[in-house]
Image (tube, helix red, strand yellow):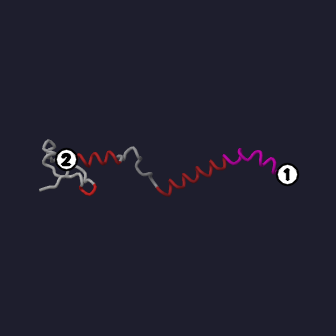
């Protein structure tokens, strides 16, 4: 008799397991919402890292005159340092 019961339980397991798992998940999510309170603001309201970086760069250059730049001829260190300074002329 037990083999017939176990065969029936085994064949009907998906039909019993899914509703039980659904109810447990629903109760758990409602309990978590009740304990935590209101959810934090959604990701759509927050700015991405690249947007924050652009805003910060714009704030840095607000007071500067971007048309005045140093000429490459005036810059001494515009090229990367060569290994052992072999390819670089000596500064006098």
Q: Measuring from the top left, give residue 66's x and y in whole percent.
A: 16, 43
Q: Magenta-highlighted stretch: main secondary structure?
A: helix
Tell me the crowding category of disc 2: few under 14, some 14 to 19, or many 20 or more residues within 10 angstroms, Cα based.
few
Q: Quadrant of the C terminus?
A: bottom left
Write down the residue under mark 2: 61
| Mark sitting on residue 3 | 1
The segment highlighted magenta reads: 1-18
Between disc 2 and disc 1, whose residue precedes?
1
Please give the count of numbered marks on the rendered protein.
2
Q: Measuring from the top left, give residue 71's x and y in whole percent.
A: 14, 45
- Front-most of residues 74 and 26: 74
Identify the residue shown where x is 54% and y is 52%: 30
Tell me the crowding category of disc 1: few under 14, some 14 to 19, or many 20 or more residues within 10 angstroms, Cα based.
few
Viewed as shown, does residue 22 lie left or right of 37? right
Question: Which of the 4 image quarters holds residue 54?
Answer: top left
Viewed as shown, does residue 60 lie left or right of 23? left
Disc 2 on helix, strand or loop?
A: loop
Identify the residue shown where x is 59% and y is 51%: 25
Question: Which of the 4 image quarters holds residue 11?
Answer: top right
Disc 1 on helix, strand or loop?
A: helix
Identify the residue shown where x is 14% and y is 55%: 91
Cα separation, mark 2 vs mark 1, equals 80 Å
């Amino acid at each position: 008799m037990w083999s017939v019961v176990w065969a029936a339980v085994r064949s009907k397991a998906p039909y019993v397991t899914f509703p039980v798992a659904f109810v447990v998940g629903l109760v758990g999510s409602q309990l978590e919402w009740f304990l935590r309170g209101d959810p934090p603001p959604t990701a759509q309201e927050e700015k991405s890292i690249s947007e924050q970086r652009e805003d910060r760069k714009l704030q840095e250059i607000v007071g500067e005159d971007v048309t005045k730049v140093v000429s490459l001829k005036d810059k001494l260190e515009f090229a990367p340092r060569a290994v052992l300074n072999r390819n670089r002329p000596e500064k006098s």
